[in-house]
Amino acid sequence: MVAIPGSAVAAPKARLVHCGDATCLRISGRRPHAAVAVRVAGRPLMVEGKRSWRATVPLATARDWASAEGGRLTVTLTDARNGGESMEIVTLPPGALGKRIELASLIVSAY
């Protein structure tokens, strides 16, 4: 296994978005080129975009994937051209798993 250079990819992110009347999880990231395949929690994922990619999945599906991964998702990028592969861990946004989280403090700042 050859690693995809770290400078070629950026850590993926996840956030909650509205998709119709439902809530979905949008996962986004960067990859070296459009031929790099994206898998989330070991499952192939159809993504939009080329180097900057994104995918939107129903929250129920993301919860199933994340429950097996302990509240996190593994995003794997595989480059079929050279066999390179990289893995990143994405932590789901608070509330995505439907659990209440008690905060000891909350800091809000304006940039």
Image (cartoon, grey):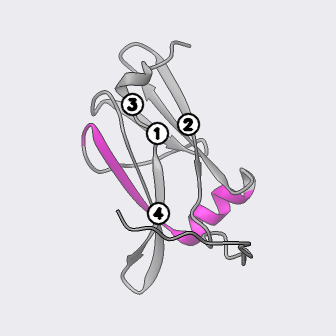
Callout 2–callout 1 Cβ contact below 8 Å = yes
Q: Residues within 10 Å of mark 3 (few under 14, many from 20)?
A: some
Q: Which kind of residue does numbered mark 4 sit on?
A: Arg
Residue matched to label 3: 9
Name the secondary structure under disc 3. Answer: loop
Residue matched to label 1: 11
Sequence-wise first label, 2 or 4? 4
Name the residue at the left extreme: 50
Sequence-wise first label, 3 or 2? 3
- What span is in magenta? 50-67
Callout 3–callout 2 Cβ contact below 8 Å = yes
Residue matched to label 4: 15
Q: Which kind of residue does numbered mark 2 sit on?
A: Glu
Q: Which kind of residue does numbered mark 1 sit on?
A: Ala
Residue matched to label 2: 88
Expressed as whole percent of the image width and height from the top left, the position of residue 103 reads: 71, 73
Q: Residue at x 56, y 13 (%)?
A: 1
Q: Which kind of residue does numbered mark 3 sit on?
A: Val
